[in-house]
Amino acid sequence: MNYGILISYIVAGFLMITILTITYNVTYSNQEVTTTLTKSNHTQAVKDIIMHDIPKIGYQKKSVLSTIFSKADSNEISFYSNIDDQGSVELVTWKYTNTPAPGSKNPNDRILERSVNGDVTEITNGVTHFKINYYDTYGSDTPLPTPISGSNYDDIVQIEVEMELQSEYELSYDINDPGDYVSTSWRKRFSPVNLRPNN
C-alpha cells in the first residue's frame, strides 16, 4: 500500500470539505445581506410615504381644518388634509389589516393599506407590525388609550408610528436549522403643526 497516495487523498478530502464549507458560508451570508438590503429598501419606501402624510394632518393651504380626524385607532388612522396641495381636501387613511399578504410564506405578513378618498393602495412588501400611538403631551411616555373617541380628538398633539418589516421567506443555514425571517424596524414620533394646542 502506498501511504503517500492515501495521505494525499485524505488531505485532498479535507481541503474539499473546507472549500465547500467556506463556499456555503459565503453563499448564505450573501443571501442574508441581499435580503436585509431588500427589506431596508422596502422600509425606506414606506417610511417616505408616511413621512409625507402624517405631518400634513389637518393641512389646508392658508388655513387649518375644523375637522381633522375621522378615526384614531392603534391600527388605523383616518384624517383630513389637502395632501397633494392641489384642489380640495382629501380623506387619508392608513390601515393595517388582518389580510395575509399574497404570495408571502411569512404568516405574520399582512397588508398595509393607504387610501386617499377611497383610492386604495395596498402595501404588500413584508409589513409584520404596524402600530399607531397617540399622545396628549409632547414627549409623554404614556399613549392615549385607543380607539380614541371623537370628543377626544382635540387632545392629540403627537403621533408615533411603529413599523416592522420581515422577509417573505425564512433563511436557513442548513436543513436542520428552523430558519429566521430577516427583519428591520422603524419608529418615529410626529408633531404635526396643525395639532398644536394653540391652533
Image (cartoon, rainbow, N blue to C red):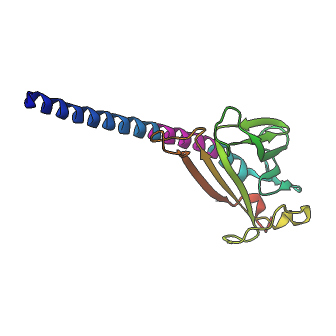
- From the top left corner, tell me how far across and down residue 153 is, in percent: 85, 63
Q: How many marks?
A: 0
What residue range appears in magenta? 33-47
Relative placement, left or right, of 45 versus 194 is left
The residue at 23%/32% (across/down) is 13
State the residue lying farthest toward the front: 1
- From the top left corner, tell me how far across and down residue 125 is, in percent: 64, 38
The residue at 45%/41% (across/down) is 173
Place residue 195 in its image quadrant. bottom right
Q: Nearer the viewer, residue 50 or 3?
A: 3
Q: Nearer the viewer, residue 17 or 36?
A: 17
Q: Nearer the viewer, residue 9 or 99?
A: 9
The residue at 61%/40% (across/down) is 45
- From the top left corner, tell me how far across and down residue 7 is, in percent: 13, 33
The residue at 73%/57% (across/down) is 132
The answer to whether 26 is drawn above or below residue 74 in the figure is above
Q: Main secondary structure of the magenta part?
A: helix
Q: Quadrant of the N terminus?
A: top left
Q: Quadrant of the C terminus?
A: bottom right
Residue 157 among those drawn in magenta: no
Residue 40 among those drawn in magenta: yes
- From the top left corner, tell me how far across and down residue 25 is, in percent: 37, 39
Place residue 146 in its image quadrant. bottom right
Relative placement, left or right, of 68 versus 18 is right
Relative placement, left or right, of 184 versus 198 is left
Relative placement, left or right, of 64 versus 56 is right
